[in-house]
Amino acid sequence: MTSHPKTHALMARGAEFLGSEHAIMCGAMSWVSERNLVSAISNAGGFGVIACGAMTPELLDAEIAATRSMTDKPFGVNLITMHPQIMDLIDVCAKHAVTHVVLAGGLPPKGSVEAIKAGNSRNGGAKVICFAPTLALAKKLLRSGADAMVIEGMEAGGHIGPVSTSVLAQEFLPELSADHLVFVAGGIGRGEAIAGYLEMGAVGVQLGTRFAAATESIAHPDFKKAFFRAGARDAVASVQVDARLPVIPVRALKNKGTEAFTTKQREVAGLLDGEGIAMSEAQLQIEHYWAGALRRAVIDGDIENGSLMAGQSVGMVKKEEPVADIIASLLDESEAALTRR
Ligand SMILES: Cc1cc2nc3c(=O)[nH]c(=O)nc-3n(C[C@H](O)[C@H](O)[C@H](O)COP(=O)(O)O)c2cc1C
C-alpha cells in the first residue's frame, strides 16, 4: 500500500523504468552528487545519479564502488558527452553493472549509446537517458536507442537552454508521452508542480536545487547558507558576450564569480581576435573555468568567487533537511493537489 496512490499511479512507468520506489530523480550536480547524496537519495526511495563531470575513469570507478557500498538500491551515472575519455567511462559503468547512464552536455558521440546498451557479459547493458533541447532531436535520440528523455527548462540550475520548463512540457509531452518515457526538470520546488507535469504525461521528475543543500549533501555550510538566503531572482543566467563563443549559459546565484565569468569570456574572445588560440581551446577554457569555480564554491565554501550554480527554485530552499523529508513533502504536496482536483 502506498500513502500517495494518485501520485504513484502517474509515476508507475517511471518508477518501473528506474527501479526505484518513486520516479523522483536527483539530477547529477558536479561535486555535489557524490556517494553521500546519491546513496541517500536512492535509500530514500528516489533515484540518485553520480555526477562524473571531469573525473578520470579511476576516480569514477572508486566513486561507483563507494556508492554501491552505501546503498543496495539502483542509482545512475551522469557522463558529459564531451569528456575526452567517455568510452573508458562507459567501460567503468559496465564493469560495475550500473543500470542507468545519463548522457548530458550535448549530442552523444558516435557509438556511445550502442556501447552503453551493449554493456559487458556481466551487466547485459544499461539503460540510456538523454537530454533533448528540441522535439525533433528528442525523436532522433529515441530512434537511435535512448530509453528515456529528460526535458530541462531554463529555470534549472547549472547549464541551461533558452526555453522554460512549462513550454518544453507543452511541446514534448503531448507528442511523446504515449509511447516514450519523459522526465521533467527545471524549476520544480514543490509537489503541486510535480502533479501538474505528471498529469500532462511525464512519468517522473528530476530536481537538483532542492537537494543540493540537503543534510546529506557534502556541500560546504556556506554554500548551503547562500541557498537558504537566496530568492528566485538571485539565480541568474550568465550572459554570452561574444557570438563566436558558443557559451552555454549557466544559472547561478549572482556574486563576484558571475561577473568574473563575463570578464573571462571577454579575455578568451580577445585571444580569438588575435588568433592567440583555436576555437576548441577557447571552448575548453570556458568549460574548465566553470568546473574550477563550482568546486571552489561547493567544496571550499568560497561563495564570493566560486560558482553557486542554483535554479530559480532556490527561493523555496529555506533550511537544511534530510533528503527523505524533502521527498516526503514533495509526495504529500503532489498527492494533496491531485486529491483536490
Ligand atoms: C550545483 C549544480 C550543479 C549541476 N551540475 C550538473 C552536471 O554536472 N551535469 C548535469 O547534467 N546537470 C547538472 N546540473 C543540473 C541538475 O542535474 C538538474 O537537472 C537541475 O538542477 C534541475 O533543475 P532545478 O535546479 O531547477 O531543480 C547541476 C545543477 C546544480 C544546481
Image: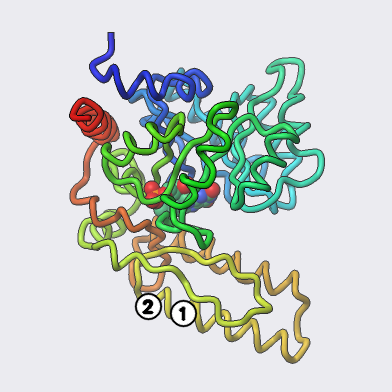
| Residue 206 visible from this viewpoint | yes
Q: Position of residue 113 (x, y in %)?
A: 73, 35
In the depicted structure, whether residue 255 falls above or below residue 44: below
Quadrant showing the C terminus: top left
Quadrant for residue 248, please give it: bottom right
Quadrant for residue 331, please give it: top left
- Mark 2–mark 1 Cα distance, whole angstroms, equals 6 Å
Q: Report the residue at 61% width, 40% height from top.
A: 130
Tell me the SS state at disc 1: helix
Q: Position of residue 177 (x, y in %)?
A: 53, 31
**Which amino acid type is shown beneath numbered disc 1?**
Ala
- Return the mark for residue 260: 1
Side of 256 where 224 appears, left or right: left
Mark 2 vs 1: CB contact within 8 A: yes
Tell me the SS state at disc 2: helix
Side of 252 where 90 appears, left or right: right
The colour scheme of the drawn protein is: rainbow
Task: Please tell me which residue lies in front, 132 or 75.
Answer: 132
Quadrant showing the N terminus: top left
Q: Position of residue 339 (x, y in %)?
A: 21, 25
Q: Report the residue at 29% width, 17% height from top.
A: 5
- Return the mark for residue 256: 2
**Which amino acid type is shown beneath numbered disc 2?**
Lys
Q: Position of residue 247 (x, y in %)?
A: 60, 70
